């Protein structure tokens, strides 16, 4: 099935790029239409940033994104990356380090921001630190473990054990992964005495 214009005129030239296109598109081909749509969306989003540095970096990112994805896909995905630059706008620290971004977004959040991170790496050489990412993930899992433990003598004992393990880690006697595994084992022991963590396990 074809529209009347396509059936009667066939193809015409795009008024923007002069390439042949289906006559039913009227004056602009699909690629030029998406180029215009992307540029319009980029202009709208850039106005939400207060800092000139953020505006400049967002504009650089938009041009890079359009080159990497093409105008169509870039226009559809652009809004997903705005929170990344909104954070940079509210924390004007210049060029953000991986550690700084990791602290805010967490490892899981940065995985969802792979495209801006790839741009930072390509444009500014900001690289991911695998060891730092692993440590951050382990710390988050420990915090979640402690946070899910009910208040009581069991939780107090667990916190005391955690403080001891941190001392060992600071001295180089254990790793962050071993700290988490040890805390998990200790919590299981506490839970075997009482699911409410209101009783310490006996020697028996």
Image: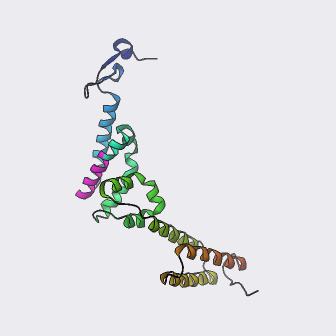
* Residue 51 sits inside the magenta stretch: yes
Tell me if residue 149 can be seen. no
Tell me if residue 191 can be seen. yes
Quadrant in the picture for residue 126? bottom left
Residue drawn where x is 34% and y is 46% of the image: 65
Residue drawn where x is 33% and y is 13% of the image: 9
Q: Relative to 7, is 190 above or below?
A: below
Left or right of 145 on screen, residue 10: left
The residue positioned farthest toward the top in the image shown: 8
Residue drawn where x is 41% and y is 67% of the image: 103
Camera-side residue: 9 or 111?
Answer: 111
Residue 144 in percent (x, y) is at: 55, 70
**Magenta-colored segment: predominant secondary structure:** helix
Q: Magenta stretch?
A: 49-63
The residue positioned farthest toward the bottom in the image shown: 203
Residue 193 in percent (x, y) is at: 72, 80
Residue 170 in percent (x, y) is at: 48, 82
Figure colour scheme: rainbow
Residue 109 in percent (x, y) is at: 45, 59
Residue drawn where x is 32% and y is 62% of the image: 90
The residue positioned farthest toward the front in the image shown: 172
């Amino acid at each position: 099935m074809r529209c009347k214009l396509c059936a009667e005129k066939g193809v015409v030239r795009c008024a923007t790029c002069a390439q042949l296109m289906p006559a039913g598109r009227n004056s602009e081909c699909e690629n030029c239409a998406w180029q215009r749509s992307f540029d319009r969306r980029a202009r709208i989003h850039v106005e939400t940033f207060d800092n000139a540095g953020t505006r400049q970096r967002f504009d650089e990112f938009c041009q890079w994104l359009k080159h990497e994805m093409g105008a169509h896909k870039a226009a559809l995905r652009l809004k997903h990356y705005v929170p990344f630059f909104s954070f940079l706008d509210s924390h004007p620290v210049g060029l953000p380090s991986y550690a700084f971004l990791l602290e805010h977004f967490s490892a899981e959040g940065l995985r969802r921001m792979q495209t801006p991170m790839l741009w930072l790496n390509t444009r500014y050489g900001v690289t991911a630190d695998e060891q730092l990412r692993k440590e951050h993930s382990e710390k988050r899992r420990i915090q979640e473990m402690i946070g899910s433990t009910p208040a009581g003598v069991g939780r107090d004992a667990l916190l005391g054990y955690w403080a001891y393990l941190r001392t060992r880690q600071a001295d180089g006697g254990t790793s962050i992964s071993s700290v988490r595994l040890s805390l998990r084992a200790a919590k299981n022991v506490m839970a075997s005495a009482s699911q409410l963590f209101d009783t310490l396990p006996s020697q028996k």
